[in-house]
Amino acid sequence: MTQTVTPYHVSGDIDYERLLDDFGADRLPDATQERLGHPLARRDVFYAGRDVERFLDADERSVVTGRGPSGPMHLGHVLPFYFAKHLQDAFDATVYVPLSDDEKYYAKDQTYPETRDYLRDNLRDVLAVGFDPENTRIVVDTDDADVVYPVASAFAGDITHNQMTATYGDPPNVGLAFYPAVQTAHLLLPQLVEGAHATLVPIAVDQDPHVRVSRDVAAKAKYDASKPGALLGKFLPSLDGPGKMSSSEGVAIHLDDDPDAVREKIASHAYTGGRATVAEHREKGGVPEEDVPFQYLQAFFEPDDDRLRDIEAAYRAGELLSGELKELAADRIVEFLRAHQSRKADLGALDAELAPYRLTADERERARSAVGL
Ligand code: TRP
């Protein structure tokens, strides 16, 4: 089986267990998934990691999860942010949200003005998640360059060219060759600001190379920062099939999609685990493992374990038809989107909304002095 999984390229049928061998991360024990206390962990979307227990046992905790603004956000992009909000509510974690506009300018065929438009729209989606501004910092690489650049430069000297190519392959330009130092700056920033403490990075598994680089930099012990932990997630599937949800291939559900259009999309494009005819379905039952609407409910949209179990059993028994299961999923997804969209629509001017989430002058100073400036 061929699979390519790097931060810049994901293709093929993904063997999630084999990736753990390749990357050297550990599968999470069920008890750890339970302790995280969220469907995404309990239902095995977040399935592996590094130092997750250390985070759970710590008394001071931060979470870092970011976004590269390469277009409008879809469901697959936003779920880690809702998960981070759960960690904030349940464990009093400080959440750092870095936006790597520089990265997407290097990695994608998009101009600075285009990147800037995506950035501003993505920031509104991040704000719509409803993080607590007292306990959340949103950092934009090009806006917060007074912090990000000196910190990234300090780390860049600790990342060798060989380490970078071994982790990412041959970069297409010098921007991406430098970018690992920038993402390491994101991942160590909470500790530069507040001193060494447990940090967890909930991300899709393709982003793990960045965490490995940041752990290597922390391990050199030049700075007061411990290795960030990783919580690695499987991809949310594309609506029309097994591959990952993506804006460029397959069918994605975007955060700005009109609810009626979403119902229509699900009805006409969802890949199901149903049988060819109703009679056959009634007789043999459906296959929830292959059914994308079921997987959406399982991952996030049906938080009630008993209700999910009933849906699964009814589908497997052939009592619930694919069309009915699609409608159940559509109801839940539309309900989620309406709530998200209404919070987004209620936001005022972006700069004013962002103000309480920005690093304070004092925090900037602490981060810079932590690397010796
Ligand atoms: N590199 C990520 C992407 O391409 C975005 C990102 C930037 C990020 N900094 C991060 C993700 C820190 C998680 C943690 O999507």
Image (cartoon, rainbow, N blue to C red):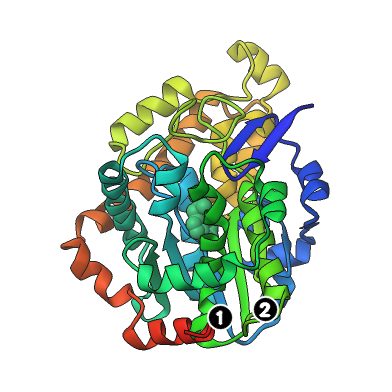
Of residues 285 and 207, which is closer to you in this image?
A: 207
x and y, in percent, of residue 129 in the image: 37, 61
Q: Secondary structure at mark 2?
A: loop
Q: Residue at x 63, y 25 (%)?
A: 273
CB under 8 Å between callouts 2 and 1? yes
Of residues 49 and 274, which is closer to you in this image?
A: 49
Residue farthest toward the left in the current orientation of the protein = 349
Residue 209 visible in the snapshot? yes
Q: Residue at x 46, y 70 (%)?
A: 96
Q: Is residue 212 above or below residue 297?
A: below
- Using the numbered discs, state the Cα–Cα distance from disc 2 to disc 1 in whole angstroms: 8 Å
Mark sitting on residue 160: none
Of residues 49 and 306, which is closer to you in this image?
A: 49
Badge 1, how many Cα within 10 Å: few under 14, some, many 20+? many
Q: Secondary structure at mark 1?
A: helix
Residue that carries the numbered disc 1 in the rendered image: 191
Q: Is residue 156 above or below residue 2?
A: below
Q: Give the amino acid type for the residue marked by disc 2 in the picture.
A: Ser
Q: Give the amino acid type for the residue marked by disc 1 in the picture.
A: Gln
Q: Residue at x 76, y 37 (%)?
A: 15
Residue 93 visible in the snapshot? no
Of residues 160 and 133, which is closer to you in this image?
A: 160
Quadrant housing the N terminus: top right
x and y, in percent, of residue 39 in the image: 60, 56
Q: Is residue 156 above or below residue 1?
A: below
Residue that carries the numbered disc 2 in the rendered image: 226
x and y, in percent, of residue 231 in the image: 65, 60
x and y, in percent, of residue 291 in the image: 61, 30
User: Image check: 253 left or right of 56?
Assistant: left
Q: Picture quarter containing residue 312?
A: top right
